Image (cartoon, grey):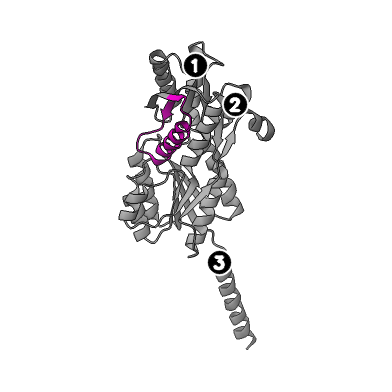
């Protein structure tokens, strides 16, 4: 009798331990990123690792070779679907091309969170996708960046715009926000608007060409910090340091340092660590069949010199 009781106790204990371990099993979440060549995304990666540890998540991070490697990044999404991870978070580099991959994830019952670059809303709706987006309102961020630039220029002068990759939602929204802001100043004229594809070297070359064609420029709006940094170099090479105000977007450390030094007028902090922490939190909620908002915006922060010296 004692032997049977002992065996039963062991069996019960084993089952309890198994159930406990199963309940405590970490959710497997994949974060698929378009690049780590930008300090903004390096900060996002660091934030993801910190949040995963805090939230007890088994996090896998994979990164495309280049920021415009759309096919490769789509392949990473499809690979994680095949591996049957519990949830996927992706920073798309195209607002249309990822829709089929998102459809595959939803069909497989895998929650997928759109982080940073928002999918095209109309195309996603036509595809029947649920919208699970976390990021910054890029229209508002672009508006705030341009508004600060216009005011610093004394509400008048010639400006140039350095655009992101054409057709990608975050760049297009930042440009649209800038156009809205500049339209509120009748004495500000946009003399050039050209893509530098988010890249510093391209921005250096594009800005140099713009300055050659339009030597009388008082301001440059760059849709990200990498391009703003390239513009700073072009301005310095042209002997125009201190004469042309330059703004950026991302709040990376070098841009903030440039703002403190007066080489840039402002940058926009998107709070990438907060963005990715919210995305992981939403992924966990989706895994547990809890509701999340279709769109979750993080409020951007304008970092001008006063803000940089005070809080950064």
Residue 135 x %, y %: 49, 46
Assess disc 1: are there few (<14), some (14-19) or many (≥20) residues with their C-alpha within 10 Å of its C-alpha: many
Mark found first going from the N terminus, 3 or 2: 3
Mark found first going from the N terminus, 2 or 1: 1
The circle on residue 259 is 2
Which residue in the structure is indicated by mark 1? Answer: 235
Quadrant containing the N terminus is bottom right
Q: Is residue 1 left or right of residue 134?
A: right
Q: CA distance from mark 3 to mark 1?
A: 58 Å
User: Which residue is the extreme one toward the right?
Assistant: 310
Select label 3 or label 1 by which is in front: 1
Q: Residue at x 58, y 56 (%)?
A: 56
Residue range in magenta is: 161-189
Can residue 232 be seen here? The reply is: yes
Mark found first going from the N terminus, 3 or 1: 3
- Above or below, 96 against 82 in this view is above
The circle on residue 210 is none
Residue 222 x %, y %: 47, 28
User: Which residue is the extreme one toward the top?
Assistant: 239
Q: CA distance from mark 2 to mark 1?
A: 15 Å
- Above or below, 31 against 150 in this view is below
Q: Nearer the viewer, residue 18 or 84?
A: 84
Which residue in the structure is indicated by mark 3? Answer: 23
- Secondary structure beneath dot 2 equals helix
Residue 273 x %, y %: 57, 44
Assess disc 2: are there few (<14), some (14-19) or many (≥20) residues with their C-alpha within 10 Å of its C-alpha: many
């Amino acid at each position: 009798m004692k032997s049977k009781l002992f065996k039963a106790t062991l069996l019960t204990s084993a089952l309890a331990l198994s159930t406990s371990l199963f309940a405590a099993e970490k959710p497997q979440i994949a974060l698929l990123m378009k690049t780590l060549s930008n300090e903004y995304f390096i900060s996002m990666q660091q934030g993801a690792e910190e949040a995963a540890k805090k939230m007890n998540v088994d996090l896998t991070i994979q990164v495309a070779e280049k920021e415009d490697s759309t096919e490769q990044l789509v392949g990473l999404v499809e690979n994680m679907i095949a591996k049957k991870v519990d949830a996927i978070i992706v920073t798309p580099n195209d607002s249309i091309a990822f829709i089929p991959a998102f459809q595959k994830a939803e069909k497989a019952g895998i929650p997928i969170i759109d982080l940073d670059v928002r999918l095209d809303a109309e195309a996603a709706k036509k595809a029947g996708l649920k919208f699970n987006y976390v990021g910054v309102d890029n229209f508002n961020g672009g508006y705030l960046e341009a508004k600060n630039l216009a005011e610093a220029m004394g509400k008048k002068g010639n400006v140039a715009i350095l655009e992101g990759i054409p057709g990608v939602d975050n760049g297009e929204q930042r440009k649209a926000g800038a156009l809205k802001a500049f339209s509120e100043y009748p004495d500000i004229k946009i003399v050039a608007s050209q893509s530098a594809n988010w890249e510093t070297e391209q921005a250096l070359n594009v800005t140099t060409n713009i300055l050659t064609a339009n030597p009388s420029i008082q301001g440059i709006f760059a849709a990200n910090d990498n391009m703003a940094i390239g513009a700073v170099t072009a301005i310095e090479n042209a002997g125009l340091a201190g004469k042309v105000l330059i703004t950026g977007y991302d709040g990376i450390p070098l841009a903030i340092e440039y703002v403190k030094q007066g080489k840039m007028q402002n940058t926009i902090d998107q709070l990438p660590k907060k963005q990715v922490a919210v995305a992981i939190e939403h992924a966990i909620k989706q895994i547990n069949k809890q509701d999340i908002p279709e769109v979750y915006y993080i409020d951007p922060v304008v970092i001008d010199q006063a803000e940089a010296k005070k809080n950064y």
